[in-house]
Amino acid sequence: MEEKELRKLYHKSVKDRNFYRVVSNEYLPKIRKKGLTPKENPYQDFKDEFRKFFLIIENLSRKGHAIHIKWAFETPPGTRVTRICRKDLRKNYIDLNPDKKHNSYYLKMKGGSMISNVKDLAKQLLKNKSLLTKNNLIQIEKVLKFCDQKSKYKMSIISISRESKYLEKAHFQHFGGKYWSSPFGRYENFKKVILREGLRKYKPYLDGKKLFYIRVLRSVPAQEVHYK
């Protein structure tokens, strides 16, 4: 591609455009001070309690007592949800949405997706208390108390410019196998990635025809984060 074409594409797909994330207002003071810190898990001190709770659902499923919760476009089994939640407890990354329209779904999840999913799982379990032991009920109550505290906060939208150099080492999640290199950040990075990987690979995503998100593994300074 010629330099003129590349610069035109950069202005269309990156320049003056943002990535977004919905966060609990509980974490805004920390974000304003430290920025985004992927390696700091907000549930670090409560991980073991969550895992004990997930085990209740998984043990019941093995005995033939499966539960389901409602998501936007499907009704997954509880064991699938616990699998995702277990992964979230181990994660050291932060995902960013490329499009504002995705924010409305997450804004409804008070406390965040983990808290929202756990509360829904707990409510489903309590619909059939006869299957639960006394210790099960104590654990569910403990987890619900934690989630209720977390879900008291409102949710807010934060954004990061697609031009930020801190997105250059992020992962491009295209939902089709291994992550790709991020073409975002400064023009030099965009040019390098597009020329190396080929525009055809990224074009449907840059044009908004295919869904993708950016997975950030490194810290993003506070001055790079903007608020709605």
Image (tube, rainbow, N blue to C red):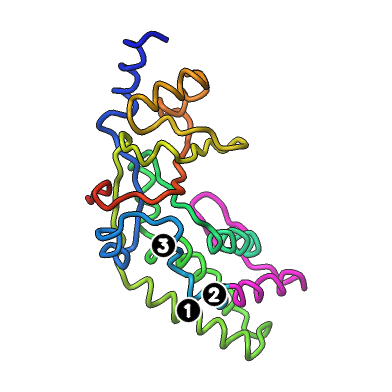
Residue under the point 31% across and 17% down: 7
What's the distance in space between the residues labelled 1 and 3, CA to CA? 14 Å
Amino acid type of the residue tagged 3 in the rendering? Gly
Image location (x, y in percent) of residue 19? 34, 41
Is residue 160 found left or right of 136 in the rendered image?
Answer: left
Residue at which label 2 appears: 122
The residue located at (43%, 62%) in the rendering is: 40
Q: Residue at x 34, y 49 (%)?
A: 220
Answer whether residue 130 is magenta in the image: no
Q: Secondary structure at mark 1?
A: helix
In-front residue for pair 120/26: 26
Dot label at residue 201: none
Residue named by callout 1: 144
Give the CA distance from mark 2 to mark 3. 16 Å
- Which residue range is magenta in the image? 51-76
Structural crowding at the residue carrying mark 1, measured as other residues with C-alpha within 10 Å and reported as few (<14), some (14–19) or many (≥20)? some
Q: Position of residue 92 (x, y in %)?
A: 50, 56
Where in the figure is residue 204, as x and y percent of width and height?
47, 24
Residue at the image point whose x is 31% and y is 55% from the top: 35
Among numbered discs 2 and 1, the one appearing first in the sequence? 2
> Which disc is residue 112 wearing?
3
**Can you say whether 138 is above or below 183 in the image?**
below
In 3D space, how far apart are the residues under numbered discs 2 and 1 (Cα atoms)? Answer: 7 Å
Which SS class for mark 3? loop
> Which residue is situated farthest in the right direction here?
63
Three-letter amino acid code of the residue under disc 1 = Leu
For the residues bearing labels 2 and 1, Cβ distance under 8 angstroms: yes
Q: In the figure, residue 81 lies in which quadrant?
A: bottom right
- Label pair 2/3, CB-CB below 8 angstroms: no
